[in-house]
């Protein structure tokens, strides 16, 4: 019997859905918005995710301008597009100076305002207006935020205090955001926003998780960090809880056992939170009717019955990542391999497995991550012994920022007096320093790829695009200011465009929405001159033979259509990782390719 929980009536105006990428934040935030609109409330749904897929889930146009959701009277939706927000911010900073400065100076200022930090603060500037009472926020009964992946969200929420502090200490200075006076006019609004977020009578934070260790660990960390920011009104939503329908299916029984075990060992700090569970359903929760089914028992039963009655065979022929390793190492002994995609799709397990498998073939390999959540070590700890030719580290934002700060102080501080050094140090406390520092570490990793294999587990899509934007800004700066022959310059951005050196691996799940998100990322990369090498589809039930449970068979059937679409329209190279009912995922995956029978891995 499928279980579900109906979300209680909401008492606060502002609702935030946050958590690890891929856990179902968008589905739950959209379903909640629809339920409340159906009840007669006037609702606004806002996405702050750079990789937003509201349009796909709602099956309705959603742009950076507020608009009605098709088929509903009381629901409006908007995407806060980081690039659009950044463009508007740049214009707001430079417009007052157009009559004072020459066009060349204005153009240079806009170039300087093209980095990742500008994009983040501009996004927050837009986001904050809905809470401060601007942008028609007061005319809604409820405003629901489908936030970006956890690390991004926390950074967003920390910005008000960070920038207020920076601008107070540098009233006449300038940062990567332009004159700090352009920020001071917003400090009062930022303070009001923080006060509202901390008010339990106004704001609720829904921590969304799967019944999986890494996902629960992430929301546990998120809960603590939100509390440190004074954001204490939290509730826990556990999505996609699997209950076997056919207990003669060993695979299904094992899946249910693992889910129950994970839920039984939930992190201590989450036990005190009000908790609700939502079942794993045999259909993708897309479009209004299926979204409504999350909170409607009779409708959910009808959709489940209809879906399970389909008797199509499960057919999927997809190569494993062992063949991807063979292809990557067939003609070279070095290179950069980057796993990219939306948070939660399996970039980390893919990067870890590729690094181990390439090292086992005898090649020198360095494995690292740019993801603030840094889950690589969790997977590596599952292995008893590592190849001697494999090195592992992470690009830690705090450590890299400290190194970068010390380097700048050593280089520029020597010629400054005490007051100048003090101002330089204050300037380096700007939040954008972290972005620059991480980029420098990222650049070093690229250099190593000229003599060994470097596998980088990237942060969720939004972070990755911001990183590449920084690379592009750096590239433009070098090309404009250097006196060297452009033909002799090899910037990190150019290295990413060099397909002989760099191989971008797009990671997706075998579901419609993650596929569309990865396809959108592929288009963004292509516009930047970066052509993805291959796709990896993670958690493929259709790669496992002998599944009998009707719910799992239904989901496996749906995978076949997604995989076929990817293969026919999106890439010439597609590889798969099977769904593995095992807690120790990395060793199980590494052993999968030498095991022929399902019984050997369960």
Image (cartoon, rainbow, N blue to C red):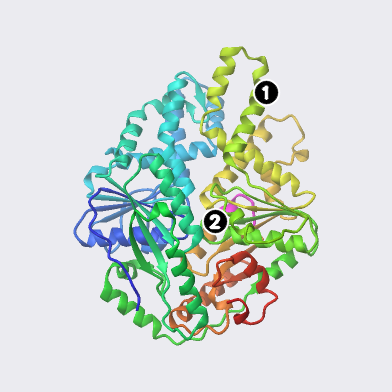
Residue count near mark 2 (Cα–Cα under 10 Å), binned few <14, some 14–19, many ≥20: many
How many discs appear? Answer: 2
Q: Earlier in the sequence, mark 2 or mark 1?
A: 1
**Does residue 118 sit above or below 421 in this rendering?**
below
Residue 417 position, x and y percent, is: 61, 12
Residue at the image position 35 percent from the left and 58 percent from the top: 29
Check if residue 525 falls in the magenta segment. yes
> Residue at label 2?
521
The span shown in magenta is 524-532
Of residues 374 and 527, the one drawn nearer to the viewer in this rendering: 374
Residue 590 position, x and y percent, is: 67, 68
Of residues 13 and 19, the one drawn nearer to the viewer in this rendering: 19
Check if residue 352 falls in the magenta segment. no
Residue count near mark 1 (Cα–Cα under 10 Å), binned few <14, some 14–19, many ≥20: few
Q: Is residue 253 visible?
A: yes
Of residues 401 and 212, the one drawn nearer to the viewer in this rendering: 212
Q: Quadrant of the C terminus?
A: bottom right
Residue 182 position, x and y percent, is: 42, 27
> Residue at label 1?
410
């Amino acid at each position: 019997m499928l279980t579900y929980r109906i979300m209680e009536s909401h008492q606060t105006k502002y609702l935030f859905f946050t958590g690890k990428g891929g856990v179902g934040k968008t589905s739950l935030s959209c379903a909640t918005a629809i339920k409340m609109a159906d009840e007669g409330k006037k609702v606004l749904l806002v996405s702050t995710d750079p990789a937003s897929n509201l349009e796909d889930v709602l099956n309705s146009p959603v742009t950076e301008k507020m608009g009605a959701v098709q088929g509903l009277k009381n629901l409006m939706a908007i995407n806060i597009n980081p690039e659009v927000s950044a463009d508007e911010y740049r214009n707001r900073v430079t417009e007052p100076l157009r009559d004072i400065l020459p066009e060349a100076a204005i153009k240079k200022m806009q170039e300087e305002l093209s980095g990742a930090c500008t994009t983040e603060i501009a996004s927050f500037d837009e986001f904050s207006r809905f809470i401060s009472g601007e942008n028609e926020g007061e005319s809604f009964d409820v405003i629901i935020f489908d936030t970006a992946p956890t690390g991004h969200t926390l950074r967003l929420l920390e910005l008000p205090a960070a920038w207020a502090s920076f601008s107070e200490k540098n009233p006449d200075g300038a940062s990567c955001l332009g004159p700090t006076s352009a920020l001071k006019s917003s400090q009062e609004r930022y303070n009001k926003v923080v006060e509202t977020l901390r008010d339990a009578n106004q704001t609720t934070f829904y921590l969304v998780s799967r019944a999986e260790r890494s996902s629960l660990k992430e929301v546990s960390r998120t809960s603590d960090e939100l509390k440190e920011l004074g954001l204490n009104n939290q509730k826990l939503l556990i999505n996609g809880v699997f209950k076997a329908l056919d207990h003669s299916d060993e695979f299904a029984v094992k899946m249910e056992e693992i889910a129950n075990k994970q839920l039984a060992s939930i992190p201590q700090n989450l036990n005190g939170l009000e908790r609700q569970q939502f079942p794993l359903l045999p259909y993708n929760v897309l479009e209004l009717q299926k979204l409504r089914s999350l909170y409607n028992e009779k409708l959910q039963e009808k959709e489940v019955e209809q879906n399970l009655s389909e008797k199509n065979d499960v057919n999927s022929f997809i190569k494993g990542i062992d063949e991807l390793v063979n292809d990557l190492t067939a003609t070279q002994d070095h290179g950069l391999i980057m796993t990219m995609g939306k948070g939660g799709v399996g970039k980390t397990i893919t990067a870890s497995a590729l690094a181990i498998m390439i090292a086992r073939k005898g090649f020198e390999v360095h494995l690292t991550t740019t993801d603030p959540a840094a889950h690589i070590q969790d997977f590596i700890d599952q292995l008893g012994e590592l190849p001697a030719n494999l090195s592992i580290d992470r690009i830690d934002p705090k450590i890299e920022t400290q190194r970068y700060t010390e380097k700048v102080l050593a280089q520029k501080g020597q010629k400054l007096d005490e007051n100048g050094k003090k101002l330089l140090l204050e300037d380096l406390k700007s939040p954008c320093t972290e972005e620059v520092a991480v980029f420098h570490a990222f650049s070093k990793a690229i250099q190593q790829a000229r003599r060994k294999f470097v596998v980088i587990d990237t942060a969720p899509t939004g972070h990755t695009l911001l990183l590449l934007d920084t690379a592009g800004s750096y590239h433009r700066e070098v090309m404009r200011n250097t006196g060297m022959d452009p033909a002799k310059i090899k910037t990190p951005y150019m290295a990413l465009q060099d397909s002989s050196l760099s191989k971008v691996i797009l990671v997706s799940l075998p579901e419609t929405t993650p596929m569309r998100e990865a396809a959108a990322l592929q288009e963004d990369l292509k516009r930047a001159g970066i052509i993805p090498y291959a796709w990896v589809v993670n958690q493929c039930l259709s790669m496992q033979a002998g599944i009998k449970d009707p719910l799992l068979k239904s989901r496996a059937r749906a995978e076949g259509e997604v995989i076929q679409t990817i293969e026919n329209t999106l890439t010439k190279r597609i590889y798969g990782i099977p769904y593995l009912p095992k807690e120790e995922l990395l060793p199980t995956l590494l052993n999968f390719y030498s095991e022929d029978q399902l019984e050997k891995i369960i």
